[in-house]
Image: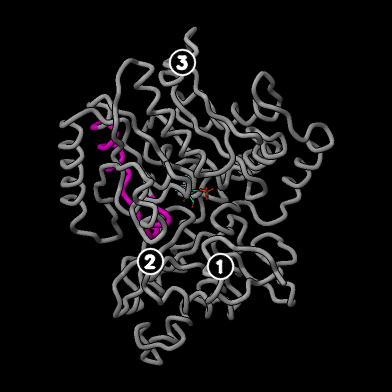
Amino acid sequence: MNKIWYPFTQMKTNREPLKVRAGKGALLQLEDGRELIDGISSWWVNVLGHAHPGIAKAIYEQALKLEHVIFAGFTHDPAEQVAEKVTSLLPAHLKRVFFSDNGSTAVEVALKMAYQYWINRGEKRSTFICFGGSYHGDTIGAMSLGERSLFNRLFDSLLFSVDFVPYPSTFPRDEEIDAKEQRILALIEEKLSIDPKIAVVIEPLVQGVGGMQMCRPQFLQKLQNLVHAYDTLLIYDEVMTGFGRTGEWFACVKSCTQPDIVCLAKGLTGGFLPLALTVCSEEIFDAFYSEDACKTFYHGHSYTANPLGCAAACATIDLLKENPECFRGMEGRHKRFLSELSQHPMLKRVRTCGTIVAMDISTEQDDGYLNKIGKAFKEQCLDKGVLIRPLGNVVYLMPPYCITDEQLAIAYDAISSTLEGLSAAGLSPSKSKSC
Ligand SMILES: Cc1ncc(COP(=O)(O)O)c(C=O)c1O
């Protein structure tokens, strides 16, 4: 009997998990001999392809030297190199790097850092402004910053409350977007003017779990100006958008904005090992730099800055630097495949941002995570050799950057033939038994 309790899985009703034997590039090889194209980079982490020999070698070589060491009172080259490499790619004022293990902890660190920043400066602030639809992870603090949803509603009484404003989601030919952004900015200004906030926290350019909602760079620029005019911190959760996902190194680079804190994880190690960073400005660091022990940032994890993770991160960044076209060129490749598909009558709001393409399927059910078409869609695409994991009625592709045009064509064919099958059978998910 398989004794594992799987994440995000109703163990009673879900089918047995598929066993994966190996991976290569954008492909996963299953135990039963089938091959799947990984259309979602295995939960958005794998940027350069599975089992990349360059990253594997870096980890192996590091393991022969030093596998791990306590990270308080001790340091090591791989961590210092990660800090150098990452800060050289971020806006210049982001100078200080705090290590942790995953996206949720990167966010926990950011929110504790921001909270204590004000205390260390002699001010007590108590609220964050966050965006509807946001997801920042599954720890209590990270859940508190996220939309109250199926994932966390049950824990509501354990979560601290934050002020939510709508996310300015947009898509090509959205005529409402100027007015929508203005309304949201006015709402944020109203909240900022009532009392000082700790920080505004946003998934910049693309809100992932919330349904691959995309916002405009100019919104982020206006948001930044507003937040800084009210002497508040701006936190970017770039756990998903980092390391080329949006077509640039980071969403803050693409949008020419200067957040005070940036959270990074997922693509950082190319999908090889868990590692995360919370990068902050010198001004924030300075508020903790003191003879007063109470101003210390008392946070850390046993595996903080694990040298193997750091070696994987250094190799990943070096490989991305050798060929930034792999992420910069992917939006153009998506668009070539989309020109026909986006006309499909069952699709709406077809949108792209760098390496990500997303589309909403029109169904008779409400849009959103609980829409049942996603599950049926996923199974049909698996039968066609493509791994996707729709978010309700939002189907998206977020492949490793090494995906070939042939593999991309298969992925798009799988989506389009699944749509065709559904419309030819006159199936809407509310009527379909397979859903
Ligand atoms: C924007 C964002 N923040 C945080 C997280 C949490 O990351 P992790 O699953 O590594 O804890 C995720 C995960 O999907 C995410 O998309």
Mark positioned earlier in the residue sequence (2 or 1):
2
- Give the residue pinned by disc 2: 369
Q: Is residue 213 magenta?
A: yes
> Mark 1: few, some, or many residues within 10 Å (few <14, many ≥20)?
many
Query: Spatial distance from mark 3 to mark 1, Cα to Cα?
Result: 53 Å
- Residue 343, how many percent across, how many down? 34, 75
Residue that mark 1 sits on: 408
Q: Amino acid at mark 3?
A: Cys
Write the start and end of the magenta stretch as one range. 206-226
Residue under label 3: 294
Outermost residue toward the bottom in this view: 425
- Given the image, on which type of amino acid does mark 2 rest? Tyr
Residue 233 location (% of width, % of height) = 33, 29
Q: Identify residue type, mark 1.
A: Leu
Write the residue at 48% across / 32% down: 90
Which residue is at a point 41% across and 63% down the rendered structure image?
A: 358
x then y, percent, for residue 325: 56, 48
Of the pair 165 and 317, the residue shown nearer to us: 165
Q: Quadrant of residue 162?
A: top left
Q: Residues within 10 Å of mark 3 (few under 14, many from 20)?
A: few
